[in-house]
Image (tube, grey):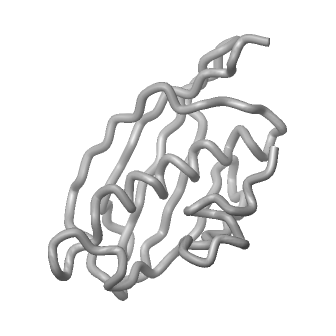
Amino acid sequence: MRTDRCFVCGPHNPLGLRLRFVEQDGALTGEFRPTDLHVGYEGIVHGGILAAVLDDVMANLLYRRGQYALTARMELRFHAPAHPGEVLHVRGWLEEEGSRAVVARGEILRAGKRVCSARAIFVRPRS
């Protein structure tokens, strides 16, 4: 399955964020700097952009293991607003793994403080 045009991590998406994830201590990490093109309210990064980044870092945990799974549910909590120009760090890790369902967690940090966190359930399709 190709993902080179993914909005969050695809290197060939001219409108995308082009995040690159690195494996570190059993988690995936990355960083990005949203611009004023990523806002909802003026001066505040759109929550949907943050949600997409979290969904992608958690999904990539499975993709990098050669596993195909789809997001079935994702719960988000916004802790603080993010602003264009800030360097944001994203981290995702697996919490629980079953035969079909996988639970993952993720967070976005600014200067070590949480901006947004998520818990998601991914489901492997039946063959």
At a point 69% along the width and 53% down the height, the residue shown is 25
Q: Which image quadrant: the N terminus?
A: top right
The picture places residue 27, in percent across and down from the top left corner, at 64, 50
* Relative to 113, 95 lies left or right: right
25, above or below 89, in the image: above
At a point 50% along the width and 46% down the height, the residue shown is 55
At a point 61% along the width and 78% down the height, the residue shown is 14
* Residue situated in front as seen by the camera: 103 or 25: 103
122, above or below 107, in the image: above
Q: Residue furthest bottom?
A: 85
* Relative to 29, 47 lies left or right: left
The picture places residue 97, in percent across and down from the top left corner, at 64, 21
Count of numbered circles on the image? 0
* Residue situated in front as seen by the camera: 25 or 109: 109
The picture places residue 2, in percent across and down from the top left corner, at 80, 51
* Residue situated in front as seen by the camera: 25 or 119: 119
Q: Which image quadrant: the C terminus?
A: top right
At a point 72% along the width and 11% down the height, the residue shown is 126
The picture places residue 91, in percent across and down from the top left corner, at 53, 56
